[in-house]
Image: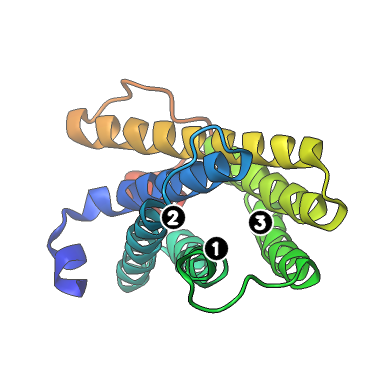
Amino acid sequence: MNNFAANLPHNQIPSLGLFALALTISTYAFSQIHLLQPPVTSLGTVLLIGGGLQILTGLHSHSEGLNTARTTLVPLGLFWLSLIGFEVFPELGYGRHPSPVAMVAYLSMWGFFVALLFLGSFRQSRPLQLIYATLMVCLLLLAMATLKENPLLLLFGSLAGIICGLTAGCTALAQLYHQWFRRTRLPRGSWQSQLNDKTDETLAP
């Protein structure tokens, strides 16, 4: 698997991480509000593939010195893999669902972790700030919805996750267009300072 990531063109690695993030958060958000309820095995497959790709992309980014991608993708990849144990295995008859208190604590912990990423993103691209912000809102609202059993909070949290997925997917697509054509065909957001190409790649997972 590491050879697979290493053989990819360097300038597509950050986009791969964003596509994987878009896939996982969107699928998970849709499964929470039952609009597009995937079979439990499909949900597990998406979380496994998406989480694994994010970890591999983060590890490859570490070897390339892309600190933002490493800090974002490796922990989030582990988060998606851990959700398989919480959401998928119990549905298949392996183990039990965690208690509501445990799930609230877990989602809140990850929500605060993303909040730290968001606070550190103000000198980075606007799309990346939006990704962090909506992911943070998604996790914290889902935690509150689990605690209070409130369907409205569940809906808003899931919608924030869907927006996060759409933003991540559009940003990844914009990066690919920029890398392929060496010009901006799609908007990628603005930065607070002038960046060269190498620095530009470090700002998006």
Marks 3 and 1 sit apart, C-alpha to C-alpha, by 30 Å
Image quarter hosting the N terminus: bottom left
At a point 21% along the width and 64% down the height, the residue shown is 5
Residue bearing the label numbered 1:
87
Above or below, 91 against 144 in this view is below
Name the residue nearer the viewer: 150 or 186. 150
Q: Amino acid at mark 3?
A: Gly
Image position, residue 15 (x, y; %) = 33, 46
Marks 1 and 2 sit apart, C-alpha to C-alpha, by 8 Å
Disc 1 to disc 2: CB gap under 8 Å: yes
The tag on residue 120 is: 3
Marks 3 and 2 sit apart, C-alpha to C-alpha, by 35 Å
Q: Amino acid at mark 1?
A: Glu
Residue bearing the label numbered 2:
40
At a point 70% along the width and 69% down the height, the residue shown is 106
Farthest top residue in view: 185
At a point 36% along the width and 22% down the height, the residue shown is 186
Number of residues whose C-alpha sits closer than 10 Å to that of mark 3, classed few (under 14), some (14–19) or many (20 or more)? few
Name the residue nearer the viewer: 205 or 123. 205
Number of residues whose C-alpha sits closer than 10 Å to that of mark 1, classed few (under 14), some (14–19) or many (20 or more)? some
